[in-house]
């Protein structure tokens, strides 16, 4: 099976122009098929403040009212997506910037929740694997903003980690998939205060004890749950680590590797 | 030769939600290969006002400073492009929303002008015909925002009429191309006060006299010059008319047809 890397880039890297440029240079040099999935970092929050649109967060998730959906669509699918594409094109990568609505690649539904109205937040229903494969086989490298649609004309704001996981899972029927969550830290840390305290391997066995002892930072838990789910669904490996060390990360030579067994 | 329609939709249609929805329904029903090119109407101007970014116009062209480039990239390539894509997808069209930077489809250079610094305005150098054909042959219908790039990482703001003309011209080596400029009027009018005074045919002969007599509104002249240039470069027909009558327009049954001879 041919290999593919699905790489999620975290918000703090996008917020820093120098770090983003450095990441994109290294990313362009990564060999083989690859898909980049980006969020929007603090730019959407800043744009909302500039436009005097109050933002409401519930459990670390942004409530997406109509005005906020407009902002994330502009910032993620417009500004950030196209600037990344232009930067990668300058490095001779055949980048194509899209969101989940394009070519109906990621269809979702508006989140239904008993207690909270998340607004225009989309939970993923389907990924069009064939269409992604067709674009990849045409020599295009996808750069994806985490905006999806419901198939009835409504755009939806989807968590970028979840979108990366859904795409990685869908592509595992066609490729040997590495799913890489890259961000501003060196990996999953056993002590949040020590940037070098990387846990090299997490498997179901030590994950339980790491959680129980509180060693794994609460913010990492959804990412790790996503990772295990992806492995259960056919992804070959999940790696979490430093976006500025992307080549080493993909090679499994740095960061935290999440293992199925 | 297979036929293709390259359709530019004007700003006043985009500004009106009801008109835009009506246009998109009719557009989705148009048979055969097609590409939609949109501008951004007053939404970019409004967003600049909301963000307190002063806008400078010279001869009807927006001076694109860095802050304005960010706005047009967000509004054109993000908000408008993705909303159009989601609407077309809901009508079962395989729409793919991109800008000129994506897949390096439209490369441009920053405008050089003796007297005016237009800022990040791009004049087109090259269209990648093969890449467009490849996407069309994959069954995708392109929806294009008029943002281009210089190949060195810089996004540029390009006039949507000019972009439509460049793409129509490039594709004329592979298809029989109809280039349609659709907007809020029924065609080129002989009297701007009379919305029904459509001039059905303009050719080089009557164009000279229409210009000399002042019958053709000054704002139409760049569009008509673009049209004649497109015909000289291989486009089969250019039609100007009502976006809300798109099927009749493409059939040449309404609007103004621009003829080579």
Image (cartoon, coloured by chain):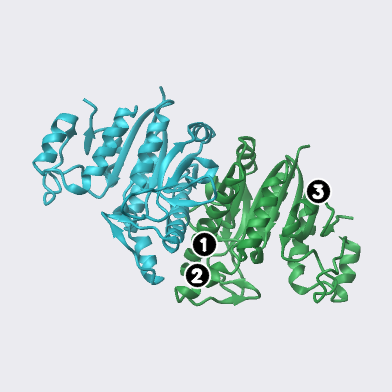
Chain colours: A cyan, B green
Q: In this rendered view, identify the residue nearer to me: A244 or A66.
A: A66
Label 2 and label 3: CA atoms lie apart by 38 Å
Task: Kindly indicate whether the residues beneath marks 2 and 3 are on one polypeptide chain.
Answer: yes
Question: Where does residue B192 sit, x and y in percent of width and height?
Answer: 80, 74
Q: Residue at x 34, y 29 (%)?
A: A233
Compared across the picture, whether A196 is left or right of B261 comes to left
In this figure, what is the number of numbered marks? 3
Question: Where does residue A1 sit, x and y in percent of width and height?
Answer: 40, 22
Question: Within 10 Å of the Cα at label 2, are there few (<14), some (14-19), or many (20+) other Cα atoms?
Answer: some
Q: Are marks 2 and 3 in contact (CB under 8 Å)?
A: no
Reading the image, the residue beneath label 2 is B47
Is the C terminus of chain A in the top left, top right, bottom left or bottom right quadrant?
A: top left
Q: Which mark is residue B236?
A: 3
Question: Where does residue A9 sit, x and y in percent of width and height?
Answer: 34, 47
Q: In this rendered view, identify the residue nearer to me: A126 or B140.
A: A126
Q: Residue at x 76, y 68 (%)?
A: B220
Label 2 and label 1: CA atoms lie apart by 8 Å
Farthest residue toward the top?
A1
Pointer 1 chain = B
Residue A249 visible (yes or no):
no
Q: Residue at x 55, y 60 (%)?
A: B76
Q: Are marks 2 and 1 in contact (CB under 8 Å)?
A: yes
Reading the image, the residue beneath label 1 is B75
Q: In this rendered view, identify the residue nearer to me: B126 or A234.
A: A234
């Amino acid at each position: 099976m041919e290999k593919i890397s699905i790489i999620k880039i975290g918000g703090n890297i996008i917020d820093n122009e120098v770090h983003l440029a450095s990441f994109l240079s290294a990313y362009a040099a990564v060999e083989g098929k690859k898909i980049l999935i980006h969020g929007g970092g603090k730019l959407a929050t800043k744009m909302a403040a500039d436009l005097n649109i109050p933002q409401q967060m519930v459990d670390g998730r942004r409530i997406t009212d109509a005005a906020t959906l407009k902002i994330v669509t502009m910032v993620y699918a417009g500004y950030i997506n196209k600037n990344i594409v232009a930067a990668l094109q300058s490095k001779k990568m055949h980048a194509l910037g899209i969101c989940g609505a394009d070519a109906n690649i990621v269809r979702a539904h508006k989140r239904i929740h008993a207690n909270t109205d998340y607004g225009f937040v989309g939970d993923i229903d389907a990924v069009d694997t064939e269409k992604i494969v067709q674009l990849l086989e045409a020599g295009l490298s996808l750069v994806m903003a985490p905006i999806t649609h419901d198939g009835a004309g409504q755009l939806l704001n989807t968590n970028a980690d979840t979108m990366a996981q859904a795409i990685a899972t869908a592509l595992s029927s066609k490729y040997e998939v590495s799913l890489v969550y890259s961000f501003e830290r060196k990996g999953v840390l056993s002590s949040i205060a020590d940037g070098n305290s990387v846990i090299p391997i997490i498997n179901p066995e030590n994950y339980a004890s790491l959680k129980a002892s509180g060693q794994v930072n609460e913010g990492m838990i959804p990412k790790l749950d996503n990772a295990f789910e992806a492995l259960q669904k056919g992804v070959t490996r999940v790696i979490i680590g430093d976006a500025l060390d992307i080549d080493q990360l993909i090679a499994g030579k740095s960061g935290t590797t999440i293992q199925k067994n």
